[in-house]
């Protein structure tokens, strides 16, 4: 590290554990909700509500089209917000009620409706849930970039956020197991269990958000720093060469990863033949994802955030690429062992990416301040969030139709054609996408020394 970078690290105060923990606390509830939606809602819809996979795929696809409006709108408006509480925390408070209500709605369709009315209910619930999450996620990620300008402290902040998010996801696995067990007792038991769990999650998440809002503080000097109209703000995002590269890379890698969540239960049941082990397999992914965060922080200092993120992309691609072999392995213990083996290393990679990626994205925002003099974290994280959800929407849409037209039949043994279609999406596609993403990201140049130079110039201006 150069002397100038060292000087910057000394100038920037470290965050207390109280602030870091308060920032990460709400993501326990958010991680819980997202995992339960992403892993179980498709299976809940097809196997319990008996909605066609293609219909649910269309609903998720439409929700991504709506995100093209809602994500940039929330990001821009939060950048422009002027309030005594700051630009971000008022949005966190506003997200509490819609997040809770739509999450309950998705898992609690009235028993008396069916057909087009049931589809409409689920469409409103799913689209509403992701819209409500946008109200929380974009300002929350933006707040993280504002809490510290320190190059490595950001990795520590987002690393804990990733860990708490993963903890929420692990708790969701327990709920998913309860729902899977309830399926054996009939539709009525599944519906009741889903309703009770969704209400409890909504209340706990609300409490965690309120705690974060009460504990955290915002920089008043960042208010009023965005002068442009929406088009100009997002034009700046795209014209930022570092942001443009990361947006393209993120879209490519998320095309590969989006299908992973939605197909894990299908792979466990219809390819590996061990549906009861699905929560344990996902836990094998989640534990190293969360527990490895302290390992990645010193490694990012030693090897640099750029190299480490590239490494996480390649490890993710190779881990899921190995999943393609599952239908061709000996049924039984061999397939189960391979599934656990690849899931463990995919979890390690996720811990690295979840820690480093938002930290690098925050550095990109500092470059924007250096070139434009504005602070528009919301616009940037809206763009990053939109890319993530757009890729997810595209793949969920495609997955629904692939399942339907490959001959998928719910709750039946699947043909080899269906199994190969599943593992092609689940294994080969992530391998190709993450490899392309890593190669492209090798051109990224905003490293620690360049960021330090930018921070010195910004401090001189201040």
Image (spheres, rainbow, N blue to C red):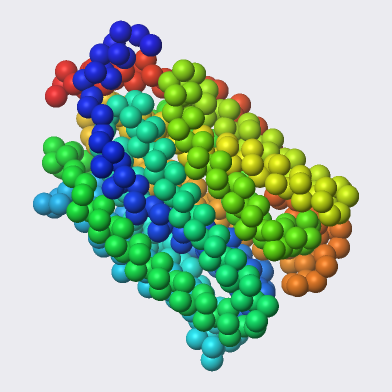
Decide: is 251 above or below 72: above
Tell me what residue is drawn at x 63 percent, y 33 percent. 315
Residue 23 percent coordinates (x, y): 30, 46
Task: Name the side, left or right, on which 275 lies relative to 228.
Answer: right
Q: Determine the residue located farthest toward the bottom in the rendered image.
A: 112
State left or right for residue 42 relative to residue 72: right
Q: Quadrant of residue 68?
A: bottom left
Residue drawn at x 68%, y 38% as measured from the top left: 319
Is there any visible trace of residue 261 in the rendered image?
A: yes
**Quadrant including the C terminus:** top left
Q: Nearer the viewer, residue 318 or 175?
A: 175
**Residue 320 percent across, percent down from the top left:** 69, 42
- Residue drawn at x 67%, y 74% is 47
Residue 365 spot, x, y in % from top left: 33, 33
Picture mark count = 0
In the picture, which quadrant includes the N terminus? top left
Q: Residue at x 48, y 29 (%)?
A: 296
Q: Name the outermost residue toward the top.
A: 3
In depth, the one of 223 and 42 nearer the eye is 42
Q: Residue furthest left?
A: 84
Q: Is residue 108 above or below residue 163?
A: below
Say if 21 sits above or below 438 in the image.
Answer: below
- Left-right relation of 403 to 189: right
Q: Can the viewer see residue 445? A: no
Q: Position of residue 396 (x, y in %)?
A: 61, 58
């Amino acid at each position: 590290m150069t002397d100038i970078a060292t000087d910057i690290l000394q100038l920037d105060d470290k965050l207390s554990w109280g602030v870091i923990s308060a920032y990460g606390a709400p993501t326990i509830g958010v991680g819980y909700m997202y995992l339960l939606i992403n892993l179980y809602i498709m299976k809940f819809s097809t196997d319990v509500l008996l909605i066609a996979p293609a219909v649910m795929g269309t609903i998720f696809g439409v929700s991504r089209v709506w995100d093209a409006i809602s994500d940039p709108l929330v990001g821009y408006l939060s950048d422009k917000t002027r309030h005594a509480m700051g630009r971000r925390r008022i949005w966190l408070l506003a997200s509490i009620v819609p997040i809770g209500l739509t999450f309950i709605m998705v898992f609690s369709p009235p028993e008396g409706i069916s057909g087009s009315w049931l589809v409409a209910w689920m469409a409103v619930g799913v689209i509403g849930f992701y819209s409500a999450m946008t109200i929380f996620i974009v300002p929350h990620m933006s707040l993280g970039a504002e809490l510290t300008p320190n190059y490595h402290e950001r990795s520590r902040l987002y690393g804990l956020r990733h860990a708490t998010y993963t903890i929420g996801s692990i708790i969701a696995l327990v709920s998913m197991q309860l729902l899977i067990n309830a399926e054996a007792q009939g539709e009525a038991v599944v519906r009741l269990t889903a309703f009770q769990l969704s209400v409890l999650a909504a209340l706990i998440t609300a409490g965690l958000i309120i705690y974060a809002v009460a504990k955290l503080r915002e920089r008043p000097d960042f208010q009023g720093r965005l002068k442009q109209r929406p088009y100009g703000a997002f034009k700046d995002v795209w014209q930022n060469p570092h942001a443009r590269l990361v947006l393209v890379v993120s879209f490519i890698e998320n095309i590969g990863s989006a299908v992973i969540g939605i197909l894990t239960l299908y792979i466990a049941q219809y390819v590996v033949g061990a549906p009861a082990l699905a929560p344990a397999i996902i836990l094998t992914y989640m534990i190293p994802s969360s527990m490895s965060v302290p390992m990645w922080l010193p490694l990012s200092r030693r090897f640099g955030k750029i190299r480490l993120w590239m490494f996480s992309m390649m490890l993710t691609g190779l881990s899921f690429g190995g999943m393609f072999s599952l239908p061709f392995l000996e049924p039984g213990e061999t397939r189960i062992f391979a599934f656990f083996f690849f899931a463990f290393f995919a979890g390690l990679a996720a811990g690295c990416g979840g820690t480093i990626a938002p930290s690098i994205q925050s550095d990109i925002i500092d470059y924007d301040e250096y070139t434009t003099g504005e602070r528009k974290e919301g616009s940037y994280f809206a763009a990053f969030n939109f890319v993530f959800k757009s890729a997810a929407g595209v793949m969920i849409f495609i997955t629904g139709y692939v399942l339907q037209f490959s001959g998928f039949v719910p709750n039946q043994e699947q043909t080899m054609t269906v199994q190969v279609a599943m593992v092609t999406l689940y294994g080969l596609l992530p391998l190709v996408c993450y490899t392309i993403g890593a190669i492209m990201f090798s051109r990224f140049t905003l490293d620690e020394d360049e960021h330090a130079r930018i921070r010195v110039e910004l401090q001189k201006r201040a």
